[in-house]
């Protein structure tokens, strides 16, 4: 009886399922999103899928067109610049606040997530990389226990997830400095400012590559 009462409602489970498709980049920029397609993909009912699409559209993760068509957003150069500005303004602060709240056990758990990122990269598992990378950041940010900034950052990740997947597929790691490792070492050292700086540089690396792809596409068009 307890298991039945605590089971996650279908509409919430469906919403989370579509969110994961967006955050992992399984739904690519410009891809049409249909109720039937998601119903089949998630083995979900039409009503929960319809409600989830409506909610994700209001959050900016999906775009509703006048002809009743729904797609994954294709970011413009100005939108990428806004995302860069917003993420750099908010996420390093969340990282600093989260770092101040993390004990040794929490740092150890975050280190394990980072190892999963490394393993996904080693295996060429881009979806796994996306999922664990998101988990790494959210684990750090949620430690800050913010009521306003956290949901704002969550929305920014929904908007940039599909473009981030395109960027990762195009550029890979590019032998860039592992800023997650820098952040973890700063956590161990108790240096919250260094944690924030590491996260700032990590965001900038990825978003600058996204900007390059979008700028290239704009030039071609």
Image: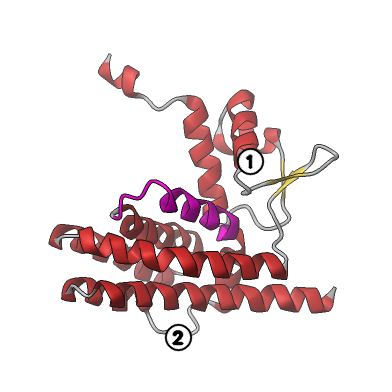
Q: Nearer the viewer, mark 1 or mark 2?
A: 1
Q: Was residue 104 drawn as part of the magenta stretch in this picture?
A: no
Specify whether 88 is left or right of 49. left
Q: Quadrant of the C terminus?
A: bottom right
Q: Of the numbered discs in the image, which one, if any, rests on residue 58?
A: 1
Q: Secondary structure at mark 1?
A: helix
Q: Of the numbered discs in the image, which one, if any, rests on residue 42?
A: none
Residue 106 place in picture, x, y as percent: 20, 58
Q: Residues within 10 Å of mark 2 (few under 14, many from 20)?
A: few
Residue 155 place in picture, x, y as percent: 53, 51
In the picture of the structure, the residue carrying the numbered disc 2 is 175
Q: Was residue 146 drawn as part of the magenta stretch in this picture?
A: yes
Q: The magenta stretch spans which residues?
A: 144-161
Whole-angstrom CA distance, mark 1 to mark 2, is: 37 Å
- Residue farthest to the left? 104
Q: What's the colour scheme?
A: secondary structure
Magenta stretch, main secondary structure, is helix
- Residue 132 appears in which quarter of the rendering? bottom left
- Residue 103 appears in which quarter of the rendering? bottom left
Of residues 117 and 149, the one nearer the viewer is 149
- Residue 210 appears in which quarter of the rendering? bottom right
Specify whether 213 is left or right of 102. right
């Amino acid at each position: 009886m307890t298991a039945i009462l605590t089971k996650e409602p279908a509409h919430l489970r469906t919403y989370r399922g579509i969110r994961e498709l967006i955050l992992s980049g399984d739904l690519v920029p410009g891809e049409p999103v249909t109720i039937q397609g998601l119903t089949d993909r998630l083995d979900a009912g039409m009503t929960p899928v319809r409600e989830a699409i409506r909610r994700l559209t209001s959050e900016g993760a999906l775009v509703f067109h006048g002809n009743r068509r729904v797609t994954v957003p294709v970011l413009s150069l100005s939108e990428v610049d806004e995302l860069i500005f917003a993420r750099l303004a908010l996420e390093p602060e969340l990282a600093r606040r989260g770092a101040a709240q993390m004990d040794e056990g929490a740092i150890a758990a975050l280190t394990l997530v980072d190892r999963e990122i490394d393993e996904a990269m080693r295996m060429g598992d881009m979806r796994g990389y996306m999922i664990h990378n998101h988990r790494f950041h959210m684990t750090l940010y949620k430690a800050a226990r913010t009521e306003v900034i956290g949901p704002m950052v969550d929305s920014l990740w929904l908007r940039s997830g599909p473009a981030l997947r395109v960027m990762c597929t195009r550029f890979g790691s590019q032998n860039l400095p592992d800023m997650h490792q820098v952040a973890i070492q700063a956590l161990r050292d108790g240096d919250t400012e260094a944690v924030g700086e590491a996260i700032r540089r990590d965001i900038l690396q990825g978003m600058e590559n996204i900007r390059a792809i979008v700028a290239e596409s704009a030039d071609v068009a």
